Amino acid sequence: MFGFIKKSLSKTVEAIKTVAPKKKISFSKEELEHILLEADVEYALVELIIEQTYQEKITREILRSKLLATLAYTTYKEPEFTSPFVELIVGVNGAGKTTTIAKLALKYKNEGKKVILGAGDTFRAAAIEQLTLWAEKLKIPIISSTQGHDPSAVAYDTIDSAKSKGFDNVIIDTAGRLHTQTNLANELKKIKRICDKAHNGAPHRTLLIIDGTQGNSAIAQAKAFNEMIGIDGIIITKLDGTAKGGSIFSIAYALELPILFVGTGEKPENLTPFDKYEFVDGLLDAIFVEKEMS
């Protein structure tokens, strides 16, 4: 696992090198501002980090503590639950939702758990087909219906099947976009209510999938989903394909929500638990030298 996050920051590191081609032991505030902005850390957060730094020359140790502070909300505590553990997956179309569900399912399967999927994005026929293909590939059962069917019914049937057959994990997909945001909000709220009727306390975790290539523009999108139904954690996808890795600081800080996993490739096994220390150190390695070169 170790090294996957750092490796997926390669494009962000290349972007940093355009404004800081030479590593140094310390940087001025102005230099550091350019570096962080180039990595797509939001301007307001960059200013906050710099304003709270009283030293004229900023070292690795100083910046490390500031960056880790922006990720203070990344701690996640799993709720108490009665099996099966039900997860609701939300996010806009194109964020990598379906692939991430497959990655999560494989992770649980490899842990020896029995997993079942619910194809709750009945708004798009392609979403049902894509998730069904993943289920077949991973040899994991799936409950699905036809396009236009009530997604709440799919959620209920999936949980009901999981309970009767002794499954450990239920992962339910949802629509990423309906005709209006109000429609989407109402649908997601209904699914949550029906999940709770099917199994008390469900969904036990609602995860938001965010496309890492969107950078800071994903913050407004994430806030909207959080206001609609409440988000418990975030998964950042396509981190390996973006130079906007620094936006993770802005997303975590703005939303005060834990980032649980990052997608570090296209394969089903390319889902890595988010390690804030590895992430921060991966960026700092691109900026600082440990000591002055002789």
Image (cartoon, grey):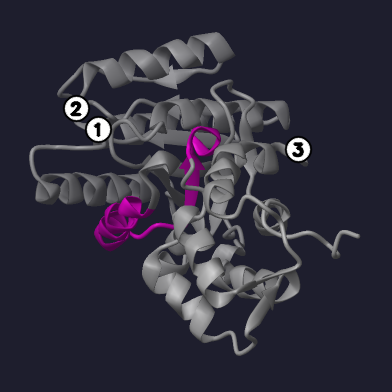
Stretch in magenta: 216-242
- The residue pinned by badge 3 equals 1
Answer with left or right where residue 180 lies relative to residue 7: left
Residue 52 spot, x, y in % from top left: 54, 86
Residue type marked 1: Pro
**Dot placed on the residue nearer the N-terminal end, 2 or 3:** 3
In the rendered structure, does residue 229 fall within the stretch colored magenta? yes
Residue 98 spot, x, y in % from top left: 41, 27
Q: Is the magenta stretch mostly helix, strand or loop?
A: helix
**Dot placed on the residue nearer the N-terminal end, 3 or 1:** 3
The circle on residue 123 is 2
Q: On screen, 81 above or below 194?
A: below
Distance from the alpha carbon under mark 3 to that under mark 1: 35 Å
Q: Which residue is drawn at 50% across and 18% down?
A: 141
- The residue pinned by badge 1 equals 151
Residue type marked 2: Phe
Q: Residues within 10 Å of mark 3 (few under 14, many from 20)?
A: few
Find out whether the residues at labels 2 and 3 contact each other: C-beta distance under 8 Å: no
Q: Give the mark toward the camera: 2 or 1.
A: 2
Snapshot quadrant of residue 151: top left
Residue 49 spot, x, y in % from top left: 52, 77
Location of the C terminus by quadrant is: bottom right
